Amino acid sequence: MSWISKILPTIGHLLGGPLGGAAVEAVAKVLKVDQPTTEKIQKALASGNLTAEQIAALQAADMQLKTRMAELGIDAEKLAAADRDSARQMQIKTGSQVPAVLGLTITIGFFGILVSLMTGTLKLWDNAGLQMLLGSLGTSWGMVVSYYFGASHIPQPGEKK
């Protein structure tokens, strides 16, 4: 879903983060999603069934959301960085092995399925459940990498560095 962050930078950045509800609400209004959740919105955006009019409306909603956040003095990147930092600080204080075990499980699952698909051990390309699992594991693996190695943020045009 990397295209989402390219054409909808504010919505793409907020989805799954501490201000994800605002992005979900903005997309739900445009796509008319009943009882919207982050998962429903991500699935709707990833479906590839968006019309040019819907994409234009989503881009307008993205700009409105960015403007509204600026009016309220909300810096989404600072909030996201604070969210990551609090998770790291908790890890330092507790010394819990759960993040490491979870990260290892996600990594093994993600690459295990990828290798199985590439070698032909799994021949389930048409299985929607497997595709959804692989997408979720891919997203989760990105989060694991961000947690352990830091997340990078590429400033958008016009954004202060």
Image (tube, rainbow, N blue to C red):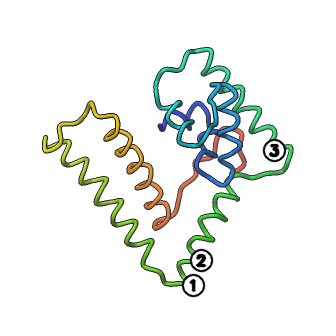
Q: Residue 84 in the image: state x and y as whole percent.
A: 59, 65
Where 156 falls versus 91 (above or below)?
A: above
Q: Residue 74 in the image: state x and y as whole percent.
A: 79, 51
Residue at 40% from the left image edge and 67% from the top image edge: 102
**Disc 2 secondary structure class:** helix
Q: Residues within 10 Å of mark 2 (few under 14, many from 20)?
A: few
Answer with the quarter of the image where residue 68 lies: top right
Where 11 falls versus 143 (above or below)?
A: above
Q: Are marks 2 and 1 in contact (CB under 8 Å)?
A: yes
**20 left or right of 40 in image:** right
Q: Tell which of 38 and 151 is nearer to you.
A: 38
**94 left or right of 137 in image:** right
How much space separates mark 3 and mark 1, taking CA atoms? Answer: 34 Å
* Amino acid, disc 1: Lys
* Amino acid, disc 2: Gln
* Amino acid, disc 3: Ala
Return the residue at label 3: 70
Return the residue at label 2: 89
How much space separates mark 2 and mark 1, taking CA atoms? Answer: 6 Å
Q: Earlier in the sequence, mark 3 or mark 1?
A: 3
How much space separates mark 3 and mark 2, taking CA atoms? Answer: 28 Å
Return the residue at label 1: 93
Q: Residues within 10 Å of mark 3 (few under 14, many from 20)?
A: few
Where 127 falls versus 160 (above or below)?
A: above
